[in-house]
Image (cartoon, coloured by chain):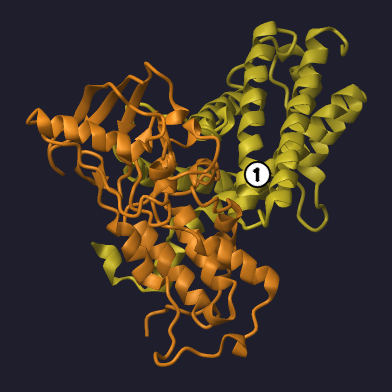
Amino acid sequence: MKITLKIWRQANKNAEGSMHSYQLDNVSEEMSFLEMLDLLNENLTAGDEEPVAFDYDCREGICGMCGIVINGSAHGRYESPVPTTTCQLHMRNFHDGDVIEVEPWRAGAFPVIKDLVVDRSAFDRIIQAGGYISVNTGSAPEAHSTPAPKRLADRAFDAATCIGCGACVAACPNGAGMLFTSAKITHLDNLPQGQPERMLRVKAMVAAHDDNGFGGCQNIGECASVCPKEIPLESIAQLNRDLIASLFRGDGRAQ
Amino acid sequence: MASTSLSVHQKAIRSNVAKKALMAVTGLVLICFLLMHMFGNLKIFVSPEAYNYYADWLKHDLLYPILPHGWFIWLFRIFLVVCLVLHIYLMAILWNASLHGRGAKYVRKNRKEQTLSAKLMRWGGITLGLLLVFHLLMFTTGTITPGFAYAVHDPYHMFLGAFSQWWVVLIYAIFVAVVCMHVRHGFWSAFTTLGANVGPGARTVLNVLAYFVAALLFVGFILPPLAVLLGMVS
């Protein structure tokens, strides 16, 4: 099939970017979206043009590295019948002659580094602030030594499937990182191992979220609708509950 | 930055989530007020005496003798103004955070979940504020008096005079329509912000309630002016 790509090209962080058009013939519908971009880059390289920079790693939908906005939706979610990452979106979801618009994640906290690559280290800083539990290292403890209720363990596991791709931020009209942060909160706060640091964790992660320039949540739900791992919107309510409760506790007060 | 000297606890208190929680509480207070106001307006269908007596009772006798005559209305007005000012002040701060948060605009954006009500929360809220000023200038201060003479002790005839004009009814129809949209998203959003969205079932319940409260307010507020305009109340 033949397609026309309109791709955001931006030389570096400080450069002005703009949309550029490229024609691609011989696109197979078996290709993933990233393989289609590989084909484009081969053509560009052969023509002595700068290839389009985009992030990827596993190409199996589990690492969270890839992520671009396709026709206005993160990971091209609205082109796909199922929740997907960009690497798992296939060209069979498009038609011959389509014009496809490709843009990077756009959010204040995710500055564009080049073309379609953005700096998502703000997520790392949220994790550093509290997305962990403190345990002694050494041999792993016996798995059954700490019982976890099945229902809560399931909730924690569902939330733990977040791959930190940033689609939630890209889709949010406010550029909020609430679905990501709340997935981490829901993951750790529902497990016995997460309890000692629970109140401090939510305060620290919410503070880091705001400090890194993410916006506020309006409970619209765009984030959950594009999430490749189907992190549910109610995770955000869990974060809200925990934060409000934590405000009545002394954790994190200046000594 | 000044914020680096704050403790984690202080940052949490100043966080967007905490601000939103306060915005949710003040918003719910205002929704409760609207429900009460709407219900009171329906007294117009009972009798002129009932309507005027109710209005007079609100202003002078409510909570008497716990409070002296006429105190309640002022305490209540102060309380509402504090809620409204907080709600607007927090909106301004959060709007600013969102403008920075969203960064550069998309060339093309495709929103799936965002309803018109959700999209218009801020601009709709500002519209509500302006219409509220108009409303107070009409019936509370008597600065704008289309079709009626300002009479503190006869709100029934002020109501009748004002809503006998089609354009006043039209402005109020727009007013309550914007209220309805704002409450529709606001009700759901407030409860979610306070943590009530515990699962898909709760999401459905909250949304159904939001639609119900919004529709109730719209119908309850628009019925009396419409009845006056159509000559069903005279």
Quadrant of the rendered image containing residue A186: bottom right
Q: Is residue A177 visible?
A: yes
Image colour for chain B is yellow
- Mark 1, residues whose alpha carbon is within 10 Å: few (<14), some, or many (≥20)? many
Q: Position of residue A140 (x, y in %)?
A: 47, 88
Query: What residue appears at the point 43 percent right and 21 percent down from the top-left corner?
Result: A95
Comparing A26 with A118, the one in front is A26
Height in image: B4 above or below B95? below
Residue labelled with disc 1: B188
Image colour for chain A is orange
- Split into 4 quadrants, where in the image is the N terminus of chain B? bottom left
Quadrant of the rendered image containing residue A126: bottom left
Height in image: A1 above or below B84? above
Query: What residue appears at the point 53 percent right and 29 percent down from the top-left corner?
Result: B124
Q: Is residue A175 visible?
A: no
Q: Is residue B160 left or right of residue A35?
A: right
Height in image: B40 above or below A251? above
Give the residue type at disc 1: Trp
Query: What residue appears at the point 57 percent right and 25 percent down from the top-left corner?
Result: B131
Q: Secondary structure at mark 1?
A: helix
Q: Residue furthest left?
A: A48
- Split into 4 quadrants, where in the image is the C terminus of chain B? top right
Q: Position of residue B229 (x, y in %)?
A: 78, 9
Q: Position of residue B209 (x, y in %)?
A: 75, 41
Q: Is residue B160 left or right of residue A53?
A: right
Query: What residue appears at the point 19 percent right and 37 percent down from the top-left corner?
Result: A52
Height in image: B65 above or below A191? above
The chain identifier of the residue carrying mark 1 reads B
Q: Position of residue B74 (x, y in %)?
A: 66, 46
Quadrant of the rendered image containing residue A174: top left
Comparing B183 with B228, the one in front is B183
Q: Is residue A57 left or right of residue A166?
A: left
